[in-house]
Structure formats: structure tokens, C-alpha cells
Amino acid sequence: PETEPAAGEEAASIGEAREAAKVCRRCQLWHDATQTVFGEGPETADVIFVGEQPGDQEDLAGKPFVGPAGRIFDSILDDAGIDRRKVYVTNAVKHFKFEPRGKRRIHSKPNAGEIQACRWWLDKELDLVKPNLVVALGATAAQSLLGKAVPVLKRRGEVIGRDDGLRVFITIHPSLILRIREQEDKEAERERFLMDMRKVRELM
Ligand code: URA
């Protein structure tokens, strides 16, 4: 179909929502992306991790957190004793937004309208999975989950309660670790993120 403004209204399971999201036209990002990258994990998960948006590799694979950020995320979850197969992992925005630069596609930040449009799907995932805890990986996720900007560096490691009772754990996006050049600083940031994930394990 050319337009599916109401895709997903009737979805009663994650599988049905994922199917409906394939034809989502709630914003324009579908146009240049390869495919919708929906959340992944058991519908019975206790915790949902929310990233920003799929990157280049996720866009091609159709799965969240499988590229460089996903690899460091997986290794730290593993160190924290969290089994990725038992948690639900998704993004605030479900299409890859990028600027072409030669042969490469450079990630560009989703804007407030795109975050708002895609929040519909995140709410659907929260509704269906009913987690005990949601982890906001970075500012975009926090903004989507809490409806306002959150200074994540200041508030990392904290739980913010929503009016509906949902607990939102604030931390950085794991790609921040990848961007640090200096080896010692990189290690220190990895350690801080690991401590956050250990807290998450206690809270879930
Ligand atoms: N970064 C994200 O926020 N999500 C992904 O799925 C991959 C990288």
C-alpha cells in the first residue's frame, strides 16, 4: 500500500505489530531506509532497552543493535550477567536516518517530530511487553520515554518514575564509548556503563 497512516492500530502481539510496522508511514523516514527495524526479544521480557535509531548495519539486517554499538552493548550486558536473549531491545525511532556521503551513509539525528511520530510504536511495545523496567540508552530514548529532554550525563544511573508507574532507568548510549579515542578514557567509560548495567540487573 502507498500509505498506511493507521498501521498497527489492531496489533495484539509483538509479531502483529512488527508486521504492521513494515508499512508504517507515520513520518517520512521510511522513504530512504531499507526497512523498518522493529524491536526484538521475548514478549514476556522483564526489561526493555531503548536505543536511538537503527544504524547502517541494523538497517540492512532488519534487527536492532547488531552493528558496532550492538557488539559493545552485548559484551557489556554479558559482563553484567544480563542475557540479551531474555530482554527486549528496541529503538525510539525505527527507521535509519542518514546523509549519503560518497558510498557511505552517515547517521543523522532524528528530530522531535520523528521521535514523536515513532513514539506510537514504542508505546505499543511497552503496552504489549509490560516490562518492570525500561532502560533509556541516551538522550533520544529518554526524550521519547519521558516526553521531555533529560540531561543524561547528569542523571545516569537514576530511575525516573513516569505518571503511569513505569520506571525509566537513565544511562548513556553505548555508541558514546565507541567514539572515545583515548584508550584509558574509553576503558573508564566502559566501566561506568558496566556499573549502570549491573544496577539494571538488580532493578529488573
Ligand atoms: N544505535 C541505536 O541506537 N540503535 C541501534 O539499533 C543501533 C545503533
Image (cartoon, helix red, strand yellow):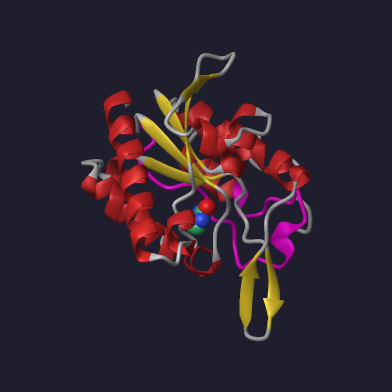
| 61 in relation to 7, above or below | below
Q: Nearer the viewer, residue 140 or 27?
A: 140
Residue at figure coordinates x 52%, y 27% from the top left: 127
User: How many callouts does the rendering have?
Assistant: 0
| Residue 30 is one of the magenta-drawn residues | yes
Side of 47 relative to 136 (left or right): left
| Residue 101 is one of the magenta-drawn residues | no
The C terminus sits in image quarter: top left
Q: Which residues are magenta?
A: 21-44
| 177 in relation to 80, above or below | below
Residue at figure coordinates x 40%, y 58% from the top left: 70
Residue at figure coordinates x 67%, y 56% from the top left: 109
Does residue 64 appear in this view? no
Please tell me in which quadrant of the rendered image residue 75 appears.
Answer: bottom left
Q: Main secondary structure of the magenta part?
A: loop
Q: Residue 131 location, x and y as percent? A: 41, 27
Side of 71 relative to 11 (left or right): left
| Residue that protrudes farthest toward the bottom in the picture | 102
Q: Residue 139 location, x and y as percent? A: 59, 42
Q: Residue 173 location, x and y as percent? A: 49, 48
Residue at figure coordinates x 67%, y 62% from the top left: 108
Q: Nearer the viewer, residue 63 or 181?
A: 181
Q: Nearer the viewer, residue 118 or 42?
A: 118
Side of 176 relative to 108 (left or right): left
Does residue 66 appear in this view? yes
| 60 in relation to 188, above or below | below
Please tell me in which quadrant of the rendered image residue 1 appears.
Answer: bottom right
| 73 in relation to 169, above or below | below
